[in-house]
Image (spheres, rainbow, N blue to C red):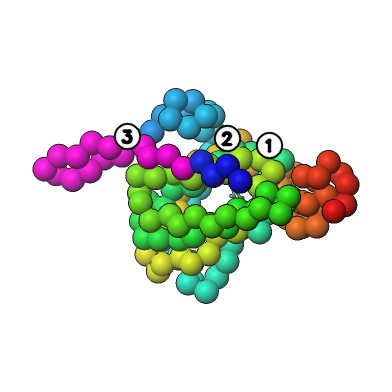
Amino acid sequence: MDIKTKNFHQKHDSRGTLTFLEGERDVPFAIKRIYYIYGVHPEERRGFHAHKRLQQYLICVHGKCSVMLDNGLGQRDHVVLEDPNAGLYVGPGVWCEMYGFSADAVLLVLASEYYDEADYIRDYDTFTTYVNGGRTL
Ligand code: TYD
């Protein structure tokens, strides 16, 4: 699977570090929404869904978490996010699960669309059928 991670711009000086990114420049979409996830128990897993159209960048701006990506075609990858300067791209048609949250983890997500429950695929069998063009594996 094509895992796209990216390091954003950083400005270091004696006061510390500033990271910045711009929609349609540093991420391939206009940012319509941001949300962030924190206070997740280390044993908890979140996500368990894919999207039909939504594009997202995941940035663990504090602490650490892991992401499992599944393309529904038999390929799975795991990515550890622990660098506040690094983003993981998650495009449409990718099943995503987040796990291994440190107690201090804050996972920031930049999203290309407003929240729309109709864009979610929350059932794994429906997802594999969807990415296989409606055919059941
Ligand atoms: P959920 O999709 O379960 O979170 P996760 O991405 O960790 O699987 O979302 C939790 C709740 O928050 C659910 O009721 C939907 C709601 N929600 C919004 O209202 N707006 C949003 O932008 C997001 C991401 C979720």
Mark 1 crowdedness (10 Å alpha carbons): few <14, some 14-19, many ≥20: few
Real-space Cα separation, disc 3 to disc 1, in angstroms: 27 Å
Q: Which residue is mark 1?
A: 53
The residues colored magenta run 5-20
Amino acid carrying label 3: it is His
Q: Position of residue 63 (x, y in %)?
A: 36, 60
Q: Which residue is mark 2?
A: 112
Q: Position of residue 94 (x, y in %)?
A: 66, 47
Label 2 vs 1, first from the N-terminus: 1
Which numbered tag is attached to residue 102? Answer: none
Helix, strand or loop at mark 3: strand
Q: Nearer the viewer, mark 3 or mark 1?
A: 3
Which residue is situated farthest in the left direction here?
14
Q: Classify residue 29 by image quadrant.
A: top right
Real-space Cα separation, disc 2 to disc 3, in angstroms: 20 Å
The dominant secondary structure in magenta is: strand
Real-space Cα separation, disc 2 to disc 1, in angstroms: 9 Å
Are the two marked residues, 2 and 1, in contact with CB atoms closer than 8 angstroms?
A: yes
Amino acid carrying label 2: it is Ser
Examine the structure image and report whether residue 19 is included in the region drawn in magenta.
Answer: yes
Q: Is residue 125 above or below residue 26?
A: below
